[in-house]
Image (cartoon, rainbow, N blue to C red):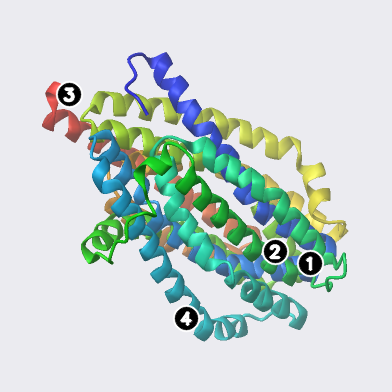
Amino acid sequence: MYETKSTREKFRLFIFIMMPILITQFGLFGMNLVDTMMSGRAGASELAGVAIGSSIWLPVSTGIMGIMMALPPILSQHIGAKEEDVVSMKVIQGAYLAVALSLVILAAGAFTLNPIIGLMELEPQVAQVAKHYLIGLSFGILPLFIQQALRGFIDSLGHTRVTMVITLLALPVNVVLNYVLIFGHFGFPELGGIGAGYASAVTYWFILFITIYFVAKVTPFREYRIFRTSYRVLPGIWKEILFIGLPIGCTIFFETSIFAAVTLLMSEFSTAVIAAHQAALNFASLLYMLPLSIAFALTIVVGHEVGAGRYSHARSYAKLGMLTALAMGVAASIIIYATRGPVIFLYTTDSTVAEWMNVFLIYAIFFQLSDAIATPIQGILRGHKDVNIPFLYAFIAFWIIGLPLGIVLARFSALGPFGYWVGLIAALAVIASTLAVRLRNIQNKKEKLHPERV
């Protein structure tokens, strides 16, 4: 990161940081995409089972990774303020915290997995796939969360291309493992959708080892000597990370868990509906990587400028990021509408699933513009370390407004399963509008407190 003078320089630096993040997010999501697509090819029950398993796992994993997202703004502000001496120590404390959170999740899963699966009225084959998909995936929880802490360090230095390279190296590994374990090639057993869980776990270990190599051996990361000092656990640093990370994690949890809750509520409908819903949501989530990547980049650049006291520069980056996100949101809407047919074929050859999925994809178009506003603003606010109020907004929008509305429409209107999607769309619209007001208030406050820096 470096100080920029003109809007053109800012846009160039922003794109330079954002594009590798975008490719990284597409790559990471591509693993889930491969799981879903290949499982769909193995059968509707396999796809539905992976859908249920993913819906249980997604809010948990993204919530924990949201906690780790506290590291980029924390480290970015230290780097922007030239306080390099504390960076190494906080990275290691983040890794320690990741280990602790992993153990908590594994322990909780051991006691709750069977009851959760049992509460759903699933066909036996679907329940079997969902349960054992999650068991396989659990072997990759520890490396996944540790790697997120190390990724926060890499990204906070502005070297987002390194994360991109790591992800691109892992993607073909994941594809091959899915092919081998789902369909039973090269002497391995045919595990169906269950194999996708084990494939993801092995891939997460691969990603961690590659990340450790870069941090330990490659400039400029090795100059921080991350692994050369033995730090004891420092509860004060954990508290700092959790103070920022817990609201971020909870915000993401509330957003992703409502999608998971909808998928679980879909269990009242047929296996074809569950499969179509998950496939359509999977593709829409792929396009969500556009605003999400912009949000990650905005957290980095805004965090640097806030740390350096350049508040006018932070506002300029915010404007650039929002305009870029809106343009991409429109493009994503067009992509969904124009490619529905080929996309459906990639997920399923079942005609019933295809019919349902076609309609779900039309509803998915309405997600795009709300996401293009809400998600980047969350990234900007994180750069300011403003995380508590957005957390409250997310809870109200998704759980007080969106989910109840979806349940009413799904059960007491002609919309049926599509009613849940209308509730989701309403929730996204609410959080987009409230966060926009919040950002304006934060920027006005900065202007009053630091007029000489505006």
Task: Write down the residue under mark 1.
Answer: 181
Mark 4: which secondary structure? Answer: helix
Q: Are marks 1 and 3 in contact (CB under 8 Å)?
A: no
Residue 132 is left or right of residue 428, and the answer is right
* Mark 4 crowdedness (10 Å alpha carbons): few <14, some 14-19, many ≥20: few
What amino acid is labelled 1 in the image? Leu
Q: Rounded to the nearest whole Å, what is the CA distance between mark 4 and mark 1?
A: 26 Å
Q: Rounded to the nearest whole Å, what is the CA distance between mark 4 and mark 2?
A: 22 Å
Q: Are marks 4 and 2 in contact (CB under 8 Å)?
A: no
Q: Rounded to the nearest whole Å, what is the CA distance between mark 1 and mark 3?
A: 57 Å
Residue 174 percent location from the top left of the image: 70, 56
Sequence-first disc among 3 and 2: 2
- Image quadrant in which you'd find residue 448: top left
Sequence-first disc among 4 and 1: 4
Task: Write down the residue under mark 2.
Answer: 199
> Considering depth in this image, is 312 or 408 the residue closer to the camera?
312
What amino acid is labelled 3 in the image? Arg
What amino acid is labelled 2 in the image? Ala
Residue 87 percent location from the top left of the image: 30, 47
Mark 2: which secondary structure? Answer: helix
> Considering depth in this image, is 356 or 83 the residue closer to the camera?
83
Q: Are marks 1 and 2 in contact (CB under 8 Å)?
A: yes
Q: Are marks 3 and 4 in contact (CB under 8 Å)?
A: no
Please give the label number shown on residue 107: 4
What residue is drawn where x is 24% and y is 57%? Answer: 240
Sequence-first disc among 3 and 4: 4
Residue 50 percent location from the top left of the image: 69, 67
Task: Write down the residue under mark 3.
Answer: 453
Mark 1: which secondary structure? Answer: helix
